[in-house]
Protein backbone atom coordinates (compact mmCIF):
# COMPACT_ATOMS: atom_id res chain seq x y z
CA UNK A 1 0.00 0.00 0.00
CA UNK A 2 1.65 3.31 -1.02
CA UNK A 3 2.26 5.80 1.74
CA UNK A 4 3.77 9.23 2.02
CA UNK A 5 6.53 10.24 4.44
CA UNK A 6 6.28 7.43 6.94
CA UNK A 7 8.00 8.04 10.28
CA UNK A 8 9.46 5.05 12.06
CA UNK A 9 10.65 4.24 15.54
CA UNK A 10 12.36 0.93 16.32
CA UNK A 11 12.40 -0.81 19.68
CA UNK A 12 13.85 -4.13 20.74
CA UNK A 13 12.61 -5.70 23.95
CA UNK A 14 13.87 -8.79 25.75
CA UNK A 15 11.57 -11.72 26.34
CA UNK A 16 10.93 -10.78 29.93
CA UNK A 17 7.52 -10.59 31.64
CA UNK A 18 5.89 -7.15 31.47
CA UNK A 19 8.33 -5.78 28.87
CA UNK A 20 5.31 -5.55 26.59
CA UNK A 21 4.30 -2.53 28.67
CA UNK A 22 7.45 -0.75 27.46
CA UNK A 23 6.17 -1.19 23.92
CA UNK A 24 2.81 0.37 24.77
CA UNK A 25 4.55 3.56 25.88
CA UNK A 26 5.75 4.05 22.30
CA UNK A 27 2.21 3.54 21.00
CA UNK A 28 0.96 6.22 23.37
CA UNK A 29 3.67 8.69 22.35
CA UNK A 30 3.18 8.29 18.60
CA UNK A 31 -0.59 8.01 18.89
CA UNK A 32 -0.82 11.28 20.78
CA UNK A 33 1.56 12.96 18.33
CA UNK A 34 -0.65 11.99 15.37
CA UNK A 35 -3.87 12.72 17.32
CA UNK A 36 -5.14 9.19 16.96
CA UNK A 37 -7.58 9.52 19.86
CA UNK A 38 -7.54 7.96 23.30
CA UNK A 39 -9.72 4.91 22.58
CA UNK A 40 -7.84 4.01 19.38
CA UNK A 41 -4.51 4.41 21.16
CA UNK A 42 -5.71 2.02 23.86
CA UNK A 43 -6.83 -0.48 21.21
CA UNK A 44 -3.40 -0.40 19.54
CA UNK A 45 -1.73 -0.80 22.95
CA UNK A 46 -3.86 -3.87 23.65
CA UNK A 47 -3.05 -5.37 20.24
CA UNK A 48 0.68 -4.74 20.77
CA UNK A 49 0.52 -6.39 24.18
CA UNK A 50 -1.12 -9.45 22.62
CA UNK A 51 1.39 -9.65 19.77
CA UNK A 52 4.29 -9.35 22.21
CA UNK A 53 3.06 -12.00 24.63
CA UNK A 54 2.31 -14.33 21.71
CA UNK A 55 5.93 -13.92 20.62
CA UNK A 56 7.19 -14.32 24.20
CA UNK A 57 5.24 -17.51 24.79
CA UNK A 58 5.06 -19.29 21.47
CA UNK A 59 7.81 -18.18 19.10
CA UNK A 60 10.75 -19.94 20.72
CA UNK A 61 12.92 -17.07 19.54
CA UNK A 62 16.56 -18.12 20.07
CA UNK A 63 17.86 -14.61 20.77
CA UNK A 64 15.18 -13.99 23.41
CA UNK A 65 14.28 -10.69 21.79
CA UNK A 66 11.27 -9.22 20.07
CA UNK A 67 11.64 -6.33 17.67
CA UNK A 68 8.97 -3.68 17.17
CA UNK A 69 8.71 -1.06 14.44
CA UNK A 70 6.22 1.76 14.94
CA UNK A 71 5.30 3.68 11.83
CA UNK A 72 3.15 6.76 11.32
CA UNK A 73 2.12 7.29 7.75
CA UNK A 74 -0.60 8.33 5.36
CA UNK A 75 -2.49 5.99 3.06
CA UNK A 76 -2.44 7.78 -0.27
CA UNK A 77 -4.87 5.34 -1.88
CA UNK A 78 -7.79 7.32 -0.45
CA UNK A 79 -8.94 10.86 -1.20
CA UNK A 80 -7.03 13.26 0.97
CA UNK A 81 -5.11 10.40 2.56
CA UNK A 82 -5.80 8.63 5.83
CA UNK A 83 -3.26 8.84 8.60
CA UNK A 84 -2.43 5.60 10.33
CA UNK A 85 -0.28 4.10 13.04
CA UNK A 86 1.25 0.79 12.03
CA UNK A 87 3.18 -1.57 14.27
CA UNK A 88 5.30 -4.52 13.16
CA UNK A 89 6.10 -7.14 15.80
CA UNK A 90 8.91 -9.50 14.74
CA UNK A 91 10.57 -12.52 16.27
CA UNK A 92 13.20 -14.96 15.04
CA UNK A 93 11.36 -18.01 16.27
CA UNK A 94 10.12 -21.15 14.55
CA UNK A 95 7.02 -19.59 13.04
CA UNK A 96 3.49 -20.92 12.86
CA UNK A 97 0.65 -21.38 10.39
CA UNK A 98 -2.02 -18.76 11.16
CA UNK A 99 -4.61 -20.75 9.17
CA UNK A 100 -4.28 -23.57 11.70
CA UNK A 101 -5.09 -21.40 14.70
CA UNK A 102 -8.55 -22.37 15.90
CA UNK A 103 -10.94 -19.50 16.60
CA UNK A 104 -11.76 -19.58 20.32
CA UNK A 105 -15.37 -19.68 21.52
CA UNK A 106 -16.36 -18.61 25.00
CA UNK A 107 -18.95 -21.36 25.47
CA UNK A 108 -16.32 -24.01 24.79
CA UNK A 109 -13.61 -22.26 26.79
CA UNK A 110 -15.85 -22.15 29.87
CA UNK A 111 -15.91 -25.95 29.99
CA UNK A 112 -12.41 -26.58 28.70
CA UNK A 113 -9.27 -26.96 30.79
CA UNK A 114 -7.37 -24.71 28.37
CA UNK A 115 -8.95 -21.27 28.39
CA UNK A 116 -6.32 -19.37 26.44
CA UNK A 117 -5.71 -18.80 22.73
CA UNK A 118 -7.42 -15.41 22.33
CA UNK A 119 -4.48 -13.30 21.15
CA UNK A 120 -4.97 -13.33 17.38
CA UNK A 121 -8.72 -12.92 17.71
CA UNK A 122 -8.22 -9.81 19.84
CA UNK A 123 -5.57 -8.37 17.53
CA UNK A 124 -7.72 -8.85 14.43
CA UNK A 125 -10.78 -7.36 16.13
CA UNK A 126 -9.08 -4.28 17.52
CA UNK A 127 -6.96 -3.31 14.49
CA UNK A 128 -8.12 -2.16 11.05
CA UNK A 129 -5.65 -4.24 9.04
CA UNK A 130 -3.57 -7.21 10.17
CA UNK A 131 -1.05 -9.16 8.12
CA UNK A 132 0.93 -12.14 9.38
CA UNK A 133 4.04 -13.45 7.67
CA UNK A 134 5.48 -16.52 9.30
CA UNK A 135 8.04 -19.13 8.38
CA UNK A 136 10.80 -21.23 9.81
CA UNK A 137 12.94 -18.15 10.46
CA UNK A 138 10.39 -16.15 12.37
CA UNK A 139 7.13 -14.28 12.38
CA UNK A 140 6.13 -10.72 11.57
CA UNK A 141 2.72 -9.36 12.50
CA UNK A 142 1.88 -6.04 10.83
CA UNK A 143 -1.02 -4.20 12.46
CA UNK A 144 -2.48 -0.96 11.23
CA UNK A 145 -4.92 1.48 12.85
CA UNK A 146 -6.38 4.42 10.94
CA UNK A 147 -7.07 7.76 12.59
CA UNK B 1 9.47 -2.13 35.58
CA UNK B 2 6.64 -3.49 37.69
CA UNK B 3 2.95 -3.35 37.05
CA UNK B 4 2.01 -5.53 40.02
CA UNK B 5 -1.73 -5.67 40.48
CA UNK B 6 -3.23 -4.68 43.80
CA UNK B 7 -6.61 -6.12 44.73
CA UNK B 8 -8.74 -4.63 47.50
CA UNK B 9 -11.69 -6.49 48.97
CA UNK B 10 -14.87 -4.85 50.21
CA UNK B 11 -17.90 -6.71 51.55
CA UNK B 12 -20.77 -4.24 51.76
CA UNK B 13 -23.04 -6.95 53.15
CA UNK B 14 -23.15 -10.71 53.56
CA UNK B 15 -24.35 -11.46 50.05
CA UNK B 16 -21.92 -9.74 47.71
CA UNK B 17 -18.23 -8.86 47.57
CA UNK B 18 -16.39 -6.22 45.59
CA UNK B 19 -12.85 -6.80 44.36
CA UNK B 20 -11.24 -3.54 43.27
CA UNK B 21 -8.21 -3.88 41.04
CA UNK B 22 -5.39 -1.40 40.60
CA UNK B 23 -2.88 -2.18 37.83
CA UNK B 24 -2.21 -4.54 34.96
CA UNK B 25 -4.30 -7.72 34.78
CA UNK B 26 -1.81 -10.17 33.31
CA UNK B 27 -1.03 -13.72 34.47
CA UNK B 28 0.10 -12.72 37.96
CA UNK B 29 -2.64 -10.13 38.28
CA UNK B 30 -5.26 -12.62 37.18
CA UNK B 31 -3.95 -15.18 39.64
CA UNK B 32 -4.25 -12.71 42.50
CA UNK B 33 -7.85 -11.95 41.55
CA UNK B 34 -8.55 -15.69 41.33
CA UNK B 35 -6.94 -16.34 44.71
CA UNK B 36 -9.19 -13.80 46.41
CA UNK B 37 -12.27 -14.84 44.44
CA UNK B 38 -11.81 -18.52 45.30
CA UNK B 39 -11.44 -17.64 48.98
CA UNK B 40 -14.77 -15.80 48.77
CA UNK B 41 -16.42 -18.72 46.96
CA UNK B 42 -15.02 -21.06 49.60
CA UNK B 43 -16.77 -19.14 52.33
CA UNK B 44 -20.04 -19.04 50.39
CA UNK B 45 -19.93 -15.57 48.81
CA UNK B 46 -20.84 -16.36 45.21
CA UNK B 47 -21.95 -12.94 43.94
CA UNK B 48 -18.87 -10.97 42.98
CA UNK B 49 -18.25 -7.55 41.48
CA UNK B 50 -14.91 -6.80 39.86
CA UNK B 51 -14.38 -3.04 39.84
CA UNK B 52 -11.63 -2.22 37.30
CA UNK B 53 -11.66 1.55 37.76
CA UNK B 54 -7.90 1.65 38.36
CA UNK B 55 -7.01 -0.94 35.71
CA UNK B 56 -6.22 0.55 32.33
CA UNK B 57 -4.73 -2.46 30.59
CA UNK B 58 -5.30 -6.20 30.57
CA UNK B 59 -3.99 -9.06 28.50
CA UNK B 60 -5.63 -12.23 27.24
CA UNK B 61 -3.80 -14.41 29.78
CA UNK B 62 -5.30 -12.37 32.60
CA UNK B 63 -8.74 -12.48 31.01
CA UNK B 64 -8.43 -16.25 30.58
CA UNK B 65 -7.97 -16.51 34.34
CA UNK B 66 -11.08 -14.36 34.78
CA UNK B 67 -12.91 -16.91 32.60
CA UNK B 68 -11.81 -19.59 35.09
CA UNK B 69 -13.20 -17.47 37.92
CA UNK B 70 -16.45 -17.01 35.97
CA UNK B 71 -16.72 -20.76 35.43
CA UNK B 72 -16.39 -21.45 39.15
CA UNK B 73 -18.86 -18.69 40.05
CA UNK B 74 -21.44 -20.11 37.63
CA UNK B 75 -20.79 -23.65 38.88
CA UNK B 76 -21.76 -22.48 42.36
CA UNK B 77 -24.90 -20.75 41.12
CA UNK B 78 -23.41 -17.31 41.59
CA UNK B 79 -23.10 -14.16 39.53
CA UNK B 80 -20.14 -12.16 38.30
CA UNK B 81 -20.29 -8.52 37.28
CA UNK B 82 -17.76 -5.96 36.13
CA UNK B 83 -17.82 -2.18 36.35
CA UNK B 84 -15.71 0.82 35.43
CA UNK B 85 -14.21 -0.85 32.35
CA UNK B 86 -12.28 1.29 29.90
CA UNK B 87 -13.88 1.28 26.43
CA UNK B 88 -11.08 -0.96 25.13
CA UNK B 89 -11.37 -3.48 27.96
CA UNK B 90 -15.15 -3.56 27.52
CA UNK B 91 -14.72 -4.04 23.77
CA UNK B 92 -12.26 -6.87 24.43
CA UNK B 93 -14.76 -8.56 26.76
CA UNK B 94 -17.35 -8.26 24.00
CA UNK B 95 -14.93 -9.72 21.42
CA UNK B 96 -14.26 -12.69 23.70
CA UNK B 97 -17.94 -13.18 24.51
CA UNK B 98 -17.36 -12.78 28.23
CA UNK B 99 -20.28 -10.38 28.40
CA UNK B 100 -22.63 -13.26 27.49
CA UNK B 101 -22.00 -14.88 30.86
CA UNK B 102 -21.07 -11.96 33.10
CA UNK B 103 -22.68 -8.52 33.18
CA UNK B 104 -20.88 -5.26 32.57
CA UNK B 105 -22.05 -2.06 34.26
CA UNK B 106 -20.80 1.52 34.14
CA UNK B 107 -20.66 1.88 37.94
CA UNK B 108 -20.96 -0.25 41.10
CA UNK B 109 -24.52 0.69 42.10
CA UNK B 110 -26.45 -1.00 39.26
CA UNK B 111 -24.01 -3.90 39.36
CA UNK B 112 -24.69 -4.51 43.05
CA UNK B 113 -28.44 -4.26 42.46
CA UNK B 114 -28.16 -6.96 39.75
CA UNK B 115 -25.93 -9.14 41.89
CA UNK B 116 -28.45 -8.95 44.74
CA UNK B 117 -31.27 -9.87 42.37
CA UNK B 118 -33.04 -6.54 42.85
CA UNK B 119 -33.11 -5.99 39.07
CA UNK B 120 -32.67 -8.29 36.10
Image: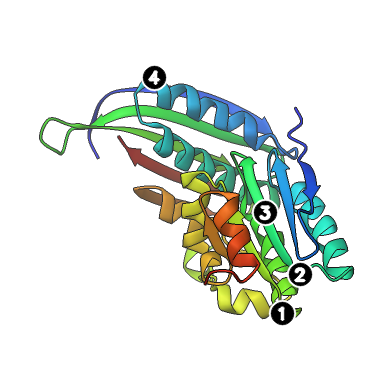
Give the labeled residue for mark 4. A33
What residue is disc 3 on?
B50
Work out whether A44 lies above or below A10.
below
Q: CA distance from mark 1 to mark 4?
A: 49 Å
Inter-mark Cα distance, 1 to 2: 7 Å
The answer to whether residue A38 is left or right of residue B28 is: left
Same subunit, tags 1 and 3: yes
Residue where numbered disc 1 is placed: B77
Label 1: chain?
A: B
| Position of residue A97 in the picture relative to residue A110 (left or right) | left
Task: Tell me the distance, in whole angstroms, between the alpha carbons under discs 4 and 3.
Answer: 34 Å
Nearer to the camera, A11 or B24: B24
Helix, strand or loop at mark 3: strand
SS for dot 1: loop
Q: Nearer the viewer, residue B107 or B13?
A: B13
Q: Contact, CB < 8 Å: mark 1 with mark 2?
A: yes
Spot occupied by residue B81 in the image (x, y as percentages of width and height): 62, 61
In which chain is the residue bearing label 3? B
Q: Which residue is mark 2?
A: B46
| Tags 4 and 2 on a common chain | no
Mark pair 3, 2: CA separation: 12 Å
Between the C-alphas of marks 1 and 3, the distance is: 17 Å
The residue positioned farthest toward the left in the image shown: A79
**Chain where mark 4 sits:** A
Q: Residues within 10 Å of mark 3 (few under 14, many from 20)?
A: many
Q: Is residue B38 above or below residue B52?
A: below
Q: Measured from the top left, where is residue A114 in percent x and y?
A: 70, 71
- Left or right: A146 in relation to B43: left
Amino acid sequence: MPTAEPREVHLTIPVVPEMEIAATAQVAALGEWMELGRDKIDEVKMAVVEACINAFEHSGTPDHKVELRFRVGTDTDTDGGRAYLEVDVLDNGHGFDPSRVTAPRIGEKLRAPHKRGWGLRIIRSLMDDVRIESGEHGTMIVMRKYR
Amino acid sequence: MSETLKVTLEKPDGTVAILRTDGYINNTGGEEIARQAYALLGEGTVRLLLDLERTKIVNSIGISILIEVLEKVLDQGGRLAFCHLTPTIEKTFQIMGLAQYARVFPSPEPALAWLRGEVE
